[in-house]
Amino acid sequence: MSIISSFKNNIFLRNTMFNYIGMIWMGGGIIVLIPFYIKLLGPHGWGIVSACLSIQAMLLILDAGCSQIMPRDIAKTNTPENIFFAYFWIYIAVAFVGAVFLTSSAGWLAFRWFNAGHSSRELEFCIRLLAIQFLFQFANNLNIGFWNGTQKQFNTNLSQVCFFSCKHCVALISLMVNPEPIVYIVSFAVVTCIEFIFNFLWITRNNIDLKGLIDNNILIQLIDLVKENYIFSFGVIVGVFVSQLDKILLSHYVETQLYGVYVIVAQLGLSFLQLQYPLMKSLLPALSSQGEKSIFNVLSLKKMIIMLLVLAFPIGLTIIFSSDILYLWTRNHYIANHGGGALALICLSVLINIPYTFIYTNLVRLNAGGIILFSNIISALSMFILFHFMKGNNSISIGGMMWIAYASISFSIGGIFLLMRAR
């Protein structure tokens, strides 16, 4: 009974549970659905979709500068609506610029960057449609950031789970009728548009008065936010860029079909990495509301160690049986043979990254943008050098090595900084 009472009264534990339920549904859903998409689209169609997914992930790098500081800023203030309005204009402006960029650069990406061969024209058209999805997907992160900052993770996860399910249901049904990459992109774009509108109306009807959107003080608030956070935001954006560096470089140097294999492998690795995100999403606002107090005021060392061990167990099994797991998952020998080594390396990097979750959350709370930027620049240089010397073997395993380099450097620099600060 005391456990239930503790759970009801502890916002951090409750939000962590909601985040894990949402993560299991969406992360598990992706793992279950990818084999169906491969079967419906075939290696050729999946390669085009993989290219579009990679472009979207790269552009969503732009969100990294806001998505981690908006919840923190909202958690620290007594007037969250003012922060919401300031970030609204940032998100809308960046979403519009990103969509215009995608539309104008679609031809260059399809014909010059990706090795799509005779499918370049089809890829170009898909990228232009992807711009619509990006516009609303990016703007919707404003709504997610508000809910996370006000520690209403139930709303966040309810919305994400429902619309995740809608997107994939619409896409799968549509692909059964017409199994073409463009159908996949259109399905997601339509539902993403509805998702943004629904969530924005939900917030503005229940939490925010829209009149404040054009208040004269918003510009001052916006300038203050930029002054306070520009170094940190830039550091985070560089970090997310570095986290996508493997996909950026491999997408140019390997053929589209092999790149599609890497996207599958990286997605499975990302699913393991996402096991940490629910914890971080709950921990950051909880820590921020505690001021300068220790992380152990929110989460005890014992609970921290238990979480680390629970997260590490399935990842360790995947490292040992990487090729077998890939084959059981996809029923495709080509994917298992070419992706097993890369998957094992990626999972090893995720193991390194698990304890770094607590380090990174503390760095965000302390607004240590300079340290994050320094760490990410060193990581980027190391990954470029690694790729330069190993790109000739036409193997996607180099992507896994880049993951390990990034995780190791980030953990070392962040950990050293916090230890020195504690002294």
Image (spheres, helix red, strand yellow):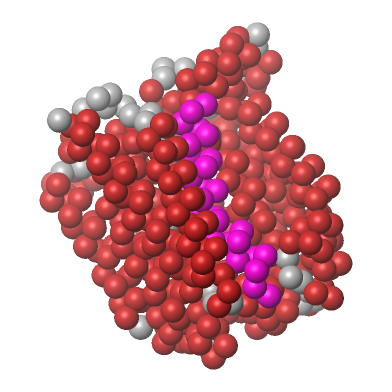
Q: Residue visible at 51% across and 70% down?
A: 390
Q: Is residue 400 left or right of residue 186?
A: left
Q: Farthest residue to the front: give it.
A: 389
Q: In this rendering, is residue 376 above or below 311?
A: above
Name the spot of residue 191 as percent of width and height, x first. 70, 54
Name the spot of residue 321 as percent of width and height, x first. 35, 83
Q: In this rendering, is residue 112 above or below 176?
A: above
Q: Residue visible at 74% across and 70% down?
A: 115
Q: Is residue 33 left or right of residue 47?
A: left
Quarter holding residue 334 = bottom right
Q: Residue visible at 22% across and 30% down?
A: 421
In the rendered image, is residue 135 in sight? yes
Q: Residue visible at 34% across and 40% down?
A: 361
Name the spot of residue 129 as percent of width and height, x first. 80, 55
Residue nearer the viewer, 116 or 84 = 116
Give the quarter of the figure containing the C terminus.
top left
Residue 253 forms part of the magenta stretch: yes
The stretch in magenta equals: 230-255
Q: Is residue 291 left or right of residue 195?
A: left
Residue 30 forms part of the magenta stretch: no
Residue nearer the viewer, 389 or 267 = 389
